[in-house]
Image: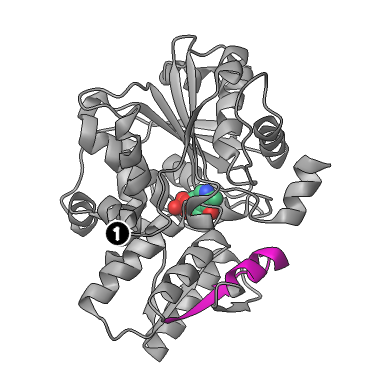
């Protein structure tokens, strides 16, 4: 199987509930009310862009959002706020997670003095479990993969009348994932003071990693609704062993990934793509690239040991996937078709995201610090 797939955006956005919620998002005004709110940094890595022979390389660094090491809290916190506006008596929030979303939800529930119950799949590391419990949530590890853990959390929440805050949607569960996606809009809006200019972005290509696809869909929705056909090209990156969006695009229907689901990129090791994210992704992305663990490990090192005067960036396994995808696209001749498809060349201005810091310190130091 090829390491990439091309897609041709159609620019059509369905006027459904997800569309409405994204359209009505007040996420940035909400996030600005937090005491420790600070726009996350946008770095320009000039030495690395010279090395990669592109014009500009920007990195939006989410390794320290609200002290939680990942962007995911932007979604969970906004969803909790929206839910409580309509249902102030909710007392228990529940979710399934491979780490970062659970941390974000635990932190948000604590803010409102609510309980939080988090289920994690069998391969979640002790360190990730500990970080969620330290935020006051009760965490239970199940002998299941991520997708089945989500089903379990949904079933028990329904039975116990807990409020499920899942970052993926399925039939008849679309409202809360849409709140989460509209919470993610904050960090795209933050770049309006820099590269996301009013009429045209100072940007040609966005490369963004994906798990269930909610975050990438939020990115696509943002650029499509702001710039229409002038949007930058958007390419998604997935781990080879867990590439549900790639395989769904390949079969032209939403399916669970068929790989062995064994990758160090825990945040991207998900199951079937989110239903509402899939609707946006298939209409708006320009392609998908698959990467290996070895490729992401070398990207983590490149962030941590920067060239020349570039900023040093602390990036976890899922965090560095966008950089790994960009490097693969530039260096690997087998990806020439996608490189041409998105017009990646010496004049390109590229945006990538560091979506997490050292969320598993043990793993991070094995890969990078030693
Ligand atoms: C660090 C990190 N990056 C990217 C993603 C992908 O987000 P999504 O699952 O919405 O595709 C996740 C998901 O948990 C994550 O934790």
**Is residue 192 found inside the magenta-colored segment of the image?**
no
Classify 47 as above or below 59. Answer: above
Residue furthest bottom as drawn? 160
Image point (31%, 32%), residue name: 193
Residue 20 in percent (x, y) is at 17, 54
Q: Which residue is mark 1?
A: 178
Residue 152 place in picture, x, y as percent: 50, 78
Q: How many marks?
A: 1
From the viewer's side, name the closer residue of 355 and 212: 355
Residue occupying the point 64% across, 41% down:
314
Residue at image x 21%, y 76%?
Answer: 86
Can the viewer see residue 212? no
Give the side of residue 302 with respect to residue 149, left or right.
Answer: right
Q: Nearer the viewer, residue 282 or 347?
A: 347
Task: Judge from the rendering whether residue 263 lies leftward or rightward of residue 227; answer left or right.
Answer: right
Question: In this rendering, does residue 277 appear at all?
Answer: yes
Q: Does residue 196 appear left or right of residue 119 in this picture?
A: left
Residue range corresponding to the magenta coloring: 114-132
Is label 1's Cβ within 8 Å of ligand 1?
A: no
Q: Is residue 198 left or right of residue 125?
A: left
- Say which quarter of the image contains residue 267: bottom right
Residue 180, percent from left and from top? 35, 59
**Quadrant including the N terminus:** top right
């Amino acid at each position: 199987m090829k390491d990439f797939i091309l897609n041709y955006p159609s620019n059509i956005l369905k006027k459904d509930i997800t569309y409405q919620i994204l359209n009505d998002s007040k996420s940035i005004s909400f996030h600005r009310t937090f005491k420790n709110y600070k726009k996350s940094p946008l770095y320009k890595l000039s030495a690395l862009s010279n090395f990669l022979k592109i014009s500009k390389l920007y990195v939006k660094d989410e390794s320290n959002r609200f002290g939680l090491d990942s962007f995911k809290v932007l979604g969970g916190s906004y969803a909790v706020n929206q839910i409580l506006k309509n249902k102030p008596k909710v007392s228990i929030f529940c979710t399934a997670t491979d780490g970062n979303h659970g941390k974000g939800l635990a932190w948000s529930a604590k803010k409102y003095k609510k309980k939080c119950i988090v289920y994690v799949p069998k391969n979640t590391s002790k360190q990730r479990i500990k970080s969620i419990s330290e935020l006051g949530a009760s965490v239970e590890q199940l002998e299941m993969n991520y997708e089945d853990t989500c089903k379990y959390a949904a079933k028990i929440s329904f039975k116990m009348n807990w409020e499920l805050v899942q970052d993926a949607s399925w039939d008849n569960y679309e409202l809360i994932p849409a709140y989460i996606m509209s919470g993610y809009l904050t960090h795209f809006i933050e770049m309006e003071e820099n590269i996301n200019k009013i009429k045209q972005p100072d940007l040609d290509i966005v490369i963004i990693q994906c798990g269930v696809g909610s975050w990438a869909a939020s990115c696509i929705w943002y650029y499509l609704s702001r710039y229409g056909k002038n949007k930058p090209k958007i390419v998604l990156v997935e781990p080879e062993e867990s590439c549900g969006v790639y395989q769904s695009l390949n079969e032209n229907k939403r399916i669970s990934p068929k790989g062995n689901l064994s990758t160090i990129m825990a945040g991207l090791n998900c199951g079937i793509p989110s239903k509402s994210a899939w609707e946006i992704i298939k209409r708006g992305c320009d392609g998908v690239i698959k990467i290996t663990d070895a490729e992401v490990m070398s990207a983590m090192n490149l962030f941590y040991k920067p060239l020349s005067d570039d900023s040093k960036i602390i990036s976890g396994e899922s965090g560095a996937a966008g950089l790994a995808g960009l490097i693969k696209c530039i260096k690997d001749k087998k990806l020439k078709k996608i490189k041409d498809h998105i017009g990646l060349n010496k004049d390109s201005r590229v945006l990538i995201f560091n979506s997490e810091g050292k969320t598993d310190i043990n793993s991070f130091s094995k890969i990078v610090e030693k």
